Image (spheres, grey):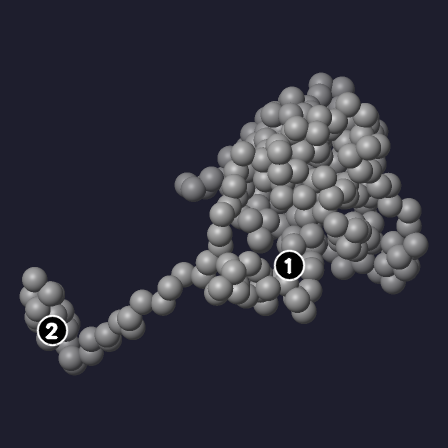
Amino acid sequence: MLNILVCVKQVPDVNLVKIDPVTGSLIRAGVPAILNPLDANALEAGVRIKEQYGGTVTAITMGPDQAAEALRECLAAGADRAVLLSDRAFANADTLATSYVIVTAAKLLGEFDLIFCGKESLDGATGQMASQLAERFDASQLSSVLSVLSVDEEKKTVVAERELAGGVETALSTLPCLMTVEKTKLRPRIPNLKSWKASRTAQILRYHSQTIPGIDPEQIGDPGSPTKVPRTYPPEKGPGGEMIREGSAVKDVEKLLGLLADKL
């Protein structure tokens, strides 16, 4: 039986987020929080593996108490258990500190054969978490996975299709393996009413800094985060461009060259 971990994140709907031009802070008031869409694809990959080979899917996230709602979405879509890592001490964490907390807590739940992640989050979009998690789990890594073709528990191997710039690659990797997935072939399922209702009352396992044995306070939250963002600001709008429509390609080029000459 495979032990599968899916790392997810609750993010603000970036289509509705605005930045305060004075403070440089995100204006979150009235902005709904959602399950990171690419993490939903990762969850679908994990659930499909469970359905085909058997096993248990655990969804884990680090965030405030409201992040439990994202975990309930995971439970509704096929996860068997959910883990919330929530503590003020975890605040202001960069990817290095976040990966440390997730792996330290996850190891309390046993050894995982497969770990799935979305390739990036909508809010940060650094794409760094997967590699850091793989390193901390001492796992092999496959990125840009389109589909998992086979898993052999006895040989401890996994075969997957990966999307490359020039095509598709079939890759063999050893377990444990962490995979980031593409959304092309892993469209998230829509939970049925029974699953959704069950997720509303399902128990969510919660950890904080005092209930994770051996956690180093210097590696969590702000102290454990070497990446510092002093200020966030929206890009400044430059002057509008000029459309050249002179009636023919020759006249368009002549017009463009004239404009360039005026700039010299």
Counting every numbered tag in the picture gives: 2
Image position, residue 142 (x, y; %): 58, 32
Disc with the residue nearer the chain's start (1 vs 2): 1
Q: Is residue 142 above or below residue 187?
A: above
* Distance of label 1 from label 2 (alpha carbons): 45 Å
Give the secondary structure at mark 2. Answer: helix
What amino acid type should be assigned to the residue bearing mark 2?
Lys
Q: Quadrant of residue 206?
A: top right
Q: Which residue is mark 2?
A: 255
Image position, residue 64 (x, y; %): 75, 50
Q: Which residue is mark 1?
A: 12
Instruction: Identify the residue shown where x is 70% and y is 40%.
Output: 90
Q: Which residue is at the front of the view, 212 or 35?
A: 212
Q: Which residue is at the front of the view, 62 or 106?
A: 62
Q: Quadrant of the C terminus?
A: bottom left
What amino acid type should be assigned to the residue bearing mark 1?
Pro
Image position, residue 194 (x, y; %): 90, 59
Instruction: Identify the residue shown where x is 52% and y is 63%.
Output: 19
Q: Quadrant of residue 247?
A: bottom left
Q: Is residue 195 above or below residue 82?
A: below
Instruction: Identify the residue shown where x is 70% and y is 33%.
Output: 101
Q: Which residue is at the front of the view, 28 or 72?
A: 28
Image position, residue 132 (x, y; %): 59, 31
**Would you say residue 111 is visible in this rendering?**
no
